[in-house]
Amino acid sequence: MLLDAAESQLVLVDYQTRLMPAIFEGPLAVANALRLAQLAQLMEVPVWGTEQNPSKLGENPADIKALCQRTLSKMQFSGVEEGLGEWLRPPAKPVAGNARSLPKHLQKSVAPTERNMIVIAGCEAHVCLMQTALDLLEDEFDVWVVTDACSSRTERNRDAAFDRLAGAGAELVTTEMVAFEWLRTAEHPDFKAAHALIK
């Protein structure tokens, strides 16, 4: 199955300023996270962020945070435990107006358009990223982990997270895979702008 921009959402987990200096290949992970957020904005894919205990670890970089619709401040390692799932799949809203005057088939709640493909990246891969992704899988989202935008303090911990996530049913992808699957064709109106971001 290929990613579809119209069905995707992007989640960027904990690229925090005080954490990143300790992260293996941290600058590369941050650069790819920013690239993903810029691609998402270009293709009208919603972007969400999380920050683990920001009073101690700092905030996400300003350029990433500015591209997020909202950023969840959390203490639980999994963002889902603190409400991220409700952002990704908001509850149905009742139809506005006088329900008694509507035909019966219109009196039900209206569900928002589902974007069930969650493209996720972040740090630390074996803690907050992994626990969030596993909870999203449990909540029946399709999860795509962007490996070159993820890391941990050690390469071994990062790779162990990828092994576990793949075994649980997550798809492992790269930033360029996401970009070209969202585009699907060189005739896409945003192809030149997207290609410039990944060159």
Image (tube, helix red, strand yellow):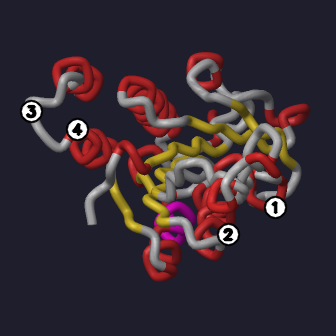
Q: CA distance from mark 4 to mark 2?
A: 28 Å
Q: Earlier in the sequence, mark 3 or mark 1?
A: 1
Circles 3 and 4 in contact, beta carbons < 8 Å: yes
**Badge 1 element:** helix
Task: Work out how far the residue at label 3 is from the one at label 4, CA to CA, in angstroms.
Answer: 7 Å
Write down the region rendered in magenta: 156-161
**10 Å crowding of disc 3: few (<14), some (14-19), many (20+):** few
Residue on which disc 4 sits: 183
User: Which residue is labeled 1 in the image?
Assistant: 81
What type is the residue that disc 1 sits on? Glu
The answer to whether 127 is drawn above or below residue 151 in the figure is: below
Q: SS for tag 3?
A: loop
- Residue 62 on the magenta segment: no
Residues at marks 2 and 3, CA–CA distance in whole angstroms? 35 Å
- Specify the amino acid type for callout 4: Leu
Q: Main secondary structure of the magenta part?
A: helix
Q: Which residue is mark 2?
A: 135
Taking the image as shown, residue 76 lies to the left or right of residue 63, namely: right
Spatial CA span between label 1 and label 4: 32 Å
Residue at 32% across / 46% down in the picture?
A: 178
Going by the numbered disc 2, the residue's amino acid type is: Asp
Magenta-span inclusion, residue 160: yes
Q: Where in the figure is residue 79, as x and y percent of width and height?
A: 74, 54
Q: Which disc is residue 186 wearing?
A: 3
Do tag 2 and tag 1 residues touch (Cβ < 8 Å)? yes
